[in-house]
Amino acid sequence: MYLQRKWKGGIILISIIILYLLFRPGVHYERIEIAGSTSVQPVAEKLAAEYMKKHPDVKINVQGGGSGLGIRTAQQGIVDIGTSSKALKPEEKDDMKEYVIGKDGIVIAVNKENPIDDLTKEQLRDIFSGKIRNWKEVGGPDAEIHVVVREEGSGTRSSFQSLVMKDAKIRPDAIVQGSTESVKQTVKQDPYAIGFVSMSHMSDDVKAIKIDGVEPSEKTVADGSYPLVVPFIFLTKGEPTGVVKDFIKWVFSPEGQNIIRSEKVVPAIANVSDDD
Amino acid sequence: MFQMTTKIGGNTMINRTREMLIEKGLFITAIFSIIVILLIVLFIFREAVPIFQDYGFLHFIFGWEWAPSEGEYGVFTMIVGSLCITFLSLAIAVPFSFLCAIFMAEIAPDSMRKILKPVIETLAAIPSVVYGFFGLIVLVPLVRTHIGGTGFGILTASLILAVMIMPTIISVSEDAIKSVPLEYKEASLALGATHWQTIINVMVPAAIPGIITSIILAMGRAIGETLAVIMVAGNVAQIPHSILDPVRALTSNIALEMGYATGLHYNALFGTAVILFIVIMILLVIANYFHYKKKIVVGGGYL
């Protein structure tokens, strides 16, 4: 009997807790769903976190999935804001509102010992497709080129594919590394390696190559003279309303743009005038 | 007296309930691990079904091309990659660890064992990402400059894996050798055999099932290792022609692309997990076959 009484108390306590969890006073949140490009994701997460800090009644959920998914789900109205790191194709554009919140460059990195400083876009395409296999073909030492790429599905890889490779395939025997950091490490320790990293992750331990004579920098990316630029785009279906509109407006405010800059992405403050 | 009896009676009842509760509790905890495994397997297979239906099971296993962006999902190159890395690492690690285990169990003086044992245990406790990073920074350039290739490949991955699985083989084999009954050793020595003859002809054969177990465990770890392999294997989905060629392991494929995969690509990664599961099962069955075969050979001396 004693045992059972003890149990009864426990059961009642547990049921009370469960009932409380089920029927506790609900707090009403405004929700914003964001999904899309994995390159935009870190910036979007940072923006969301800062915005939620200022507006505790708003919940923003940021997911990845790729630019394609971002465009599709925004069109279907599944998410409030789709993100993309590719400019929209004309047939995708109808009814969609595009906001370029910032720009990132893709930097072609080689080892510091490599004498090559400058490559054209065509040479780059031939190197990554495997047509050029030796550094001496582009004026370097007589050594095989070790091509390092990112894995299939990576935002940087798909941007590189569409900006540089166009329809050519990246050579299938290129070394695949799973993160920007390991691409950099690989290039850093191999004098004959070449790889691509996003400009926001660039550091001094590898050498950035000029493309068609233009050096990658915040300035050349912002004015569009550097050819390998990735736009960070927010997409909404039609004119945004309510809290979504407020969020996008805040992103283009100096405060929002500063957060974008702190993520080492070139902010697009110039856009603010055409969007408001 | 009367009071006494009722008390004992009452206690027996409480004891019996308690006994039953403990029994059931233990049963539930034991069955829990089985349920979890079953749920995981069920989930993986359910997620993988679409790729087998749309792409074809055999096509999926024996396809040579992995290019999700073009709708090609063949994992054969990765099966080969995983097996190459696993077997080469075992080939490197087993002889070393086997001799090390003999040394530690039979020959090393106590003072030396006191140092060796914790060192080997520490080796087992190092996280795999540290091994991977070490491989990327130290081993890859070493292999590239002294042996050739890009440095990323089967050899580098196997070397790293060999170091990672050695502690498992050493400690399990050492325990196996140590638990051979002392009578065996005494009998052998009494017959005039030297220490080394005793080890090789009596101790090791008697400990073989335990040693095989250690190799099975090591094989499981080698084929399942992901992070360290991703960092040094090069991850190229191709059939290797030499041990310096980069390969992609099944585990690496899942980990590399899981972050972005949607639709059929996502199912294909679960399909990869199913294949990995099947490969491990086949290897386990083969290894267990040898385990039990050796058990019979030793006869009454099975440990």
Image (cartoon, rainbow, N blue to C red):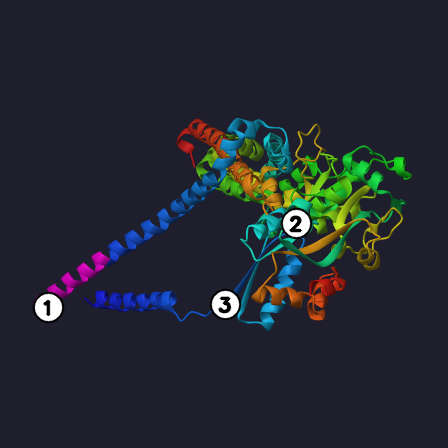
Three-letter code, disc 1? Gln
Q: Position of residue A240 (x, y in %)?
A: 60, 61
Kindly state the secondary structure of the residue where label 2 is placed. Answer: loop
Image position of B166 (left or right of B142) = left
Residue B188 visible within the image:
no
Alpha carbon separation for disc pair 1 and 2? 90 Å
Number of the label disc, if any, that sits on residue A29:
3
The percent coordinates of residue A214 (x first, y second) are: 87, 51
* Residue type highlighted by circle 2: Lys
Q: Which mark is residue B116?
A: none
Chain of the residue where label 1 is placed in the rendered structure: B
A20 falls in the magenta region: no
Q: Residue at x 29, y 55 (%)?
A: B22
Circle 2 residue:
A93
Magenta segment boundaries in residue numbering: B1-17
**Subunit ID for the residue under disc 3:** A
| Circle 3 Cα neighbour tier, 10 Å, few/some/many (<14 / 14–19 / ≥20) | few
Asked whether disc 1 touches disc 3, contact meaning CB atoms under 8 Å apart, the reply is: no
Q: Which quadrant holds residue A152?
A: top right
From the image, tell me which residue sits under label 1. B3
Task: Tell me the quarter of the image containing the C terminus of chain B.
Answer: top left
